[in-house]
């Protein structure tokens, strides 16, 4: 039980990587706030799964693209469980399109969902973490695309690269408070965001992955749980890829 006595928020936790993270944090003892925007039924299923395994969780709706909503999410977590120790910024979306055909809305939606939400949640979470004087853990979900780029994903790559710069800067700001800030950069995983890709594109990604397969969702969750634990207390400002080696191929 690496996280016994800890309280965690996972944004965008109703499905995919966020769902896997929420379940694994709870399996390791954390009380988890499962954030969602629209998928109430899916978020309720995550909470039920956690409770069925003996964990504690609650679902909280908030569109974290808006600062007021993100602040409300943080306040609800603190009011419900009395503290906040771990924040996982996972909320994300894609609007893939070559730049000449990309609309301003395509750009804004991705930047607001993927990057501005990280600012919103971190800004709201930092004060209760500092006031508690027990340190804290912030883990931001970036992407290998934020490191190497990808045609047709200029908006997504920019948002994920922005998360990396934000992570490193915030790690320098909060180090003296014993709050660590790290980023995790997944490669290709079977999620709703990758389900829209053609089989040809998926096979091409696998061919460029040294391990020769897609990732499995718990493989991201295991790393996040480690970074959220006291075992990672001396790791901050890092970007750790979970990509089967595609970032080096």
Image (cartoon, rainbow, N blue to C red):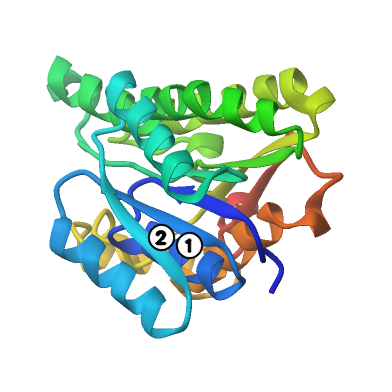
Task: Judge whether 166 appears above or below 209 on screen.
Answer: above
For this view, does 23 lie left or right of residue 15? right
Residue drawn at (48%, 74%) of the image? 55
Which label sits on residue 133?
A: none
Task: Judge whether 144 appears above or below 14 on screen.
Answer: above
Residue drawn at (67%, 63%) of the image? 3
Q: Position of residue 94 (x, y in %)?
A: 25, 40
Which label sits on residue 21?
A: 1
- Badge 2 vs badge 1, beta-carbon distance below 8 Å: yes
State which quadrant residue 95 falls in: top left
Q: Position of residue 213 (x, y in %)?
A: 48, 75
Marks 2/1: CA–CA distance? 6 Å
Image quadrant holding the C terminus, namely bottom right
Q: Position of residue 170 (x, y in %)?
A: 66, 22
Which type of secondary structure does the marked residue at label 2 adopt?
helix
Q: Position of residue 147 (x, y in %)?
A: 56, 36
- Disc 2 target residue: 17
């Amino acid at each position: 039980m690496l996280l016994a006595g800890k309280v965690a928020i996972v944004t965008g936790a109703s499905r995919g990587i966020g769902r896997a993270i929420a379940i694994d944090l709870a399996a390791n003892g954390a009380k988890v706030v499962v954030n969602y925007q629209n998928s109430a039924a899916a978020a309720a299923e995550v909470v039920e799964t956690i409770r069925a395994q003996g964990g504690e969780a609650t679902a909280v709706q908030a569109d974290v693209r808006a600062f007021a909503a993100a602040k409300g999410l943080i306040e609800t977590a603190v009011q419900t469980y009395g503290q906040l120790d771990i924040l996982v910024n996972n909320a994300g979306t894609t609007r893939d399109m070559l730049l000449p055909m990309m609309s301003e809305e395509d750009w804004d939606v991705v930047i607001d969902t993927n990057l501005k939400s990280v600012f919103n949640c971190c800004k709201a979470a930092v004060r209760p973490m500092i006031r508690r004087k027990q340190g804290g853990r912030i883990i931001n979900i970036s992407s290998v695309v934020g490191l190497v780029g990808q045609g047709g994903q200029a908006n997504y790559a920019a948002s994920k690269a922005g998360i990396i710069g934000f992570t490193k800067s915030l790690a320098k700001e909060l180090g003296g408070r014993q709050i660590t800030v790290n980023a995790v950069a997944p490669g290709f995983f079977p999620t709703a965001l990758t389900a829209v890709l053609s089989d040809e594109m998926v096979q091409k990604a696998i061919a460029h992955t040294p391990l020769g397969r897609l990732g499995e969702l718990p493989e991201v969750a295991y790393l996040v749980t480690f970074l959220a634990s006291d075992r990672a207390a001396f790791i901050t400002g890092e970007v750790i890829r979970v990509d089967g080696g595609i970032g080096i191929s």
